[in-house]
């Protein structure tokens, strides 16, 4: 209703101005003597036109100011949305890191848990000296290398840290050096049989075999950590991967 009245008033003023201008033009161009009121009308008309010009200019300035304020508001809103998105990303990243850390701990505990049954099986086989039970010690070595392969796979996925894998491979180098025996089969013989199988696994088998062969035979100045980095660099599931437990943090010896 208010907009309708405003429009009607503006229309009426416009019509009056047009009519006044028409009458003024008629008399101002007439060859006869102009009435006195024409001079007054001339002054009034000029004043009205000047006021209209001022109003148009002021309206333009006001519209420009409003446009600037709106742009500024949109900019501040965009900044707020950006800050909110960053906050959401940080929250998601924190939750993801916690999930990955918990998964890493579960996997490490799982790998450590595989060691104890194997040690118990090794003790059992040791008490059977002189008794030929090939199924027992053969299965032991098969399980042993399955655990080693699973640990390497977890490392490749980013769930096991470089420090822990370095510690575990140090024990494997020690086993290779003394050629530890379980039953009639030694560590080296068991490895030769195992790598014939794992080298056929296309995805990570060749790297697994190359890593263990290099760790077994390396007697130079290059450490196990450098060997791992050269063959299979560590993979973090996301930047600043949290809680990659080191050997000193949790202790214990995995197979």
Image (tube, rainbow, N blue to C red):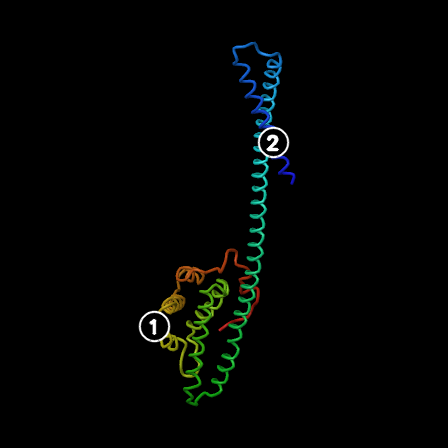
Residue 161 locus on image (x, y percent):
50, 63
Q: On screen, 114 above or below 249?
A: below
The crowding category of the residue bearing disc 2, from other C-alpha atoms within 10 Å (few below 14, some 14 to 19, many at least 20), is few
Front-lying residue, 156 or 71: 71
Residue 146 locus on image (x, y percent):
44, 75
Front-lying residue, 196 or 8: 8
Q: Quadrant of residue 201?
A: bottom left
Residue 222 locus on image (x, y percent):
41, 60
Residue for badge 2: 10
Relative side of 86 to 149, left or right: right
Residue at 45%, 87% (x, y): give it: 129
Q: Secondary structure at mark 2?
A: helix
Q: Which is more foreground, mark 1 or mark 2? A: 2
Front-lying residue, 28 or 120: 28
Q: On screen, 204 above or below 9?
A: below
Q: On screen, 11 above or below 78?
A: above
Residue for badge 1: 200
Front-lying residue, 10 or 94: 10
Residue most extreme to the bottom = 131
Residue at 57%, 60% (x, y): give it: 95
């Amino acid at each position: 209703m208010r907009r309708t009245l405003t429009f009607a008033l503006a229309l009426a003023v416009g019509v009056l101005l047009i009519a006044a201008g028409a009458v003024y033009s008629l008399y101002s161009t007439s060859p006869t003597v102009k009435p006195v009121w024409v001079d007054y009308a001339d002054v009034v008309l000029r004043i009205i036109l000047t006021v209209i010009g001022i109003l148009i200019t002021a309206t333009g300035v006001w519209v420009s100011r409003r446009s600037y304020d709106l742009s500024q508001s949109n900019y501040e809103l965009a900044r707020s949305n950006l800050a909110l998105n960053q906050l959401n990303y940080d929250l998601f990243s924190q939750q993801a890191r916690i999930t990955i850390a918990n998964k890493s701990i579960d996997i490490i505990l799982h790998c450590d848990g595989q060691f104890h049954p194997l040690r118990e099986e090794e003790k059992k086989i040791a008490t059977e000296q002189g008794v030929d039970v090939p199924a027992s010690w053969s299965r032991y070595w098969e399980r042993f290398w399955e655990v080693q392969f699973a640990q390497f796979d977890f490392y490749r996925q980013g769930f096991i840290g470089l420090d822990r894998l370095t510690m575990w491979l140090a024990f494997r180098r020690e086993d290779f050096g003394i050629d530890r025996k379980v039953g009639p089969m030694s560590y080296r013989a068991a490895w030769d049989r195992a790598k014939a199988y794992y080298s056929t696994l296309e995805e990570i088998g060749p790297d697994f075999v190359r890593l263990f062969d290099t760790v077994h035979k390396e007697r130079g100045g290059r450490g196990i950590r450098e060997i791992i980095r050269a063959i299979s660099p560590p993979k973090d599931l996301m930047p600043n991967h949290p809680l990659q437990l080191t050997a000193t943090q949790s202790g214990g010896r995995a197979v």
